[in-house]
Amino acid sequence: MRRLLAFLVLTALVVGGAVWLADRPGEVTIRWQGWRLDTTVPVLLIVLAAVLAMLALIGRLVRLVLGAPRRWLASRRAKRLRKGYTALSDGLAAVASGDSRRAERLARKADKLLKDKGATALLAAQAAQMTAEGDQLRPSFEAMTERSETAFLGHKGLMDLALQRGDKDEARREGAVALALQPGFAGLAPALADLQAEAGEWAEAEQTLRTARRHGALGAAEVSRRMALLMFGRARAALDSGNEAQALDWAVEARDRDPLFVPAVALAASLYHRRGKTRKAVSLLKAAFAVTPHPALITQWLALGEGEAPLERVKRVQALVSRNPASPDGHVALAEAALAAQLWGQARTHLQKALEQRPERRVFALLARLEREERQDETAATAWMVKGGTDGFPDRAWTCGGCGRVTDEFSLACPSCGVVGRSEWI
């Protein structure tokens, strides 16, 4: 529609101009070098238009001839670029399909054809990862770090390589650079924070978690849980260095960030007691046991009354267990206290309740002890021990989620595999 309108307007202008010239005839005389040329105005205009058209045509031909080499080079570059990107895309497809040989061949071809070494380095690294080991991948990742488009992948790859060979110092350095480039990348911040915590870089680990929260890589609840772990680690480190006051501050902050984190509650209560603030310790332990009954809380509760007579200890345990009377751990604690006080009936009652709720092997062992101490019945005691070995559940303990190591006490980093914050009470 627009072209038709433009054509009509142009035609109208030409016709109008022709009519205007026809209505105004005139003559033109040109004298030059003894020559004389007489003509009319319309003829002169037509000649001028023809000359201009010829000059334009000649100029176009000259440009075509002079620009031919440049166009040939541009065409060759475009063809080379097309081949390079075809090799790159085919190589990525080969990686996705698991064809390592084809991926490596296409990576080399793309590297020859393309100037963008970042993109080809990415393909080369992915192809090499399918067959290569260790530092054979390092040159590809290092090449990727030199370009802004692939720098993050390069540093992340170098971090992974460092972890594979156990170089956690380099892993932390490369991880920190990668996090600065892409702070919202899922999984990077927790891994880096764990490495920093394992190395005692507490402030850096906290900053890593704050960055992850700010950029949406971790949710608020997960950050609070991890922050509690870091505070607990700082508390243990301060305690090991003899700074009880600082250790107490960190332990309380860990408990505040995660009130259900039993090791932090137990540590804070212990430090309160050691510093003469037993009432605060009592308050912490009672509040925690009401929500999360745990043997560590009972152990710490008993430590508040160290040296008490057996009957006093029974009363002490009752005061705590009353906050959560249905707890199987509470029944076991009451049974142990009753056994020590020779309250055989109470001990048997609580052991039977614990057996109904969770028949752990320690419950069978306590029943065997009860038979020996109350009735001196070795046969019955042996029967309970045999039954515990066949029917009893394993006693719960702190179990590493990385390697499965079982320990009685919680530790921030697993002594065997070094994984941080993966110990669970199961």
Image (cartoon, rainbow, N blue to C red):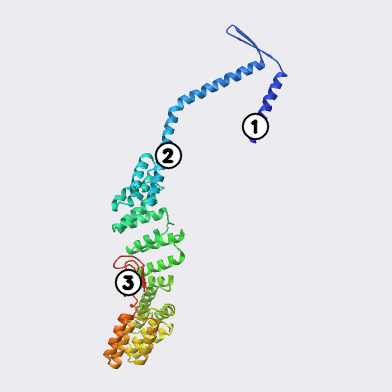
Residue 286 picture location, percent across and down:
42, 81
In the displayed structure image, the side of residue 49 where residue 96 appears, left or right? left
Q: Quickly name the residue at label 3.
A: 239
Does label 3 or label 1 sit earlier along the sequence?
1
Amino acid residing under circle 3 = Leu
Whether 253 is drawn above or below 24: the answer is below
Label 3 – label 1 distance at C-alpha: 88 Å
Quarter of the image for the C terminus: give it.
bottom left
Whether 87 is drawn above or below 206: the answer is above
Whether 84 is drawn above or below 310: the answer is above
Quarter of the image for the N terminus: give it.
top right
Q: Circle 2 sits in a helix, a strand or a loop, which is it?
A: helix
Using the rendered image of the protein, determine whether residue 309 is visible from the camera's viewpoint.
Answer: no
Q: Residues within 10 Å of mark 1 (few under 14, many from 20)?
A: few
Amino acid residing under circle 2 = Arg
Q: Quickly name the residue at label 1.
A: 6
Residue 145 picture location, percent across and down:
36, 48
Work out whether residue 28 or residue 5 is closer to the camera in this orientation and state it.
Answer: 5
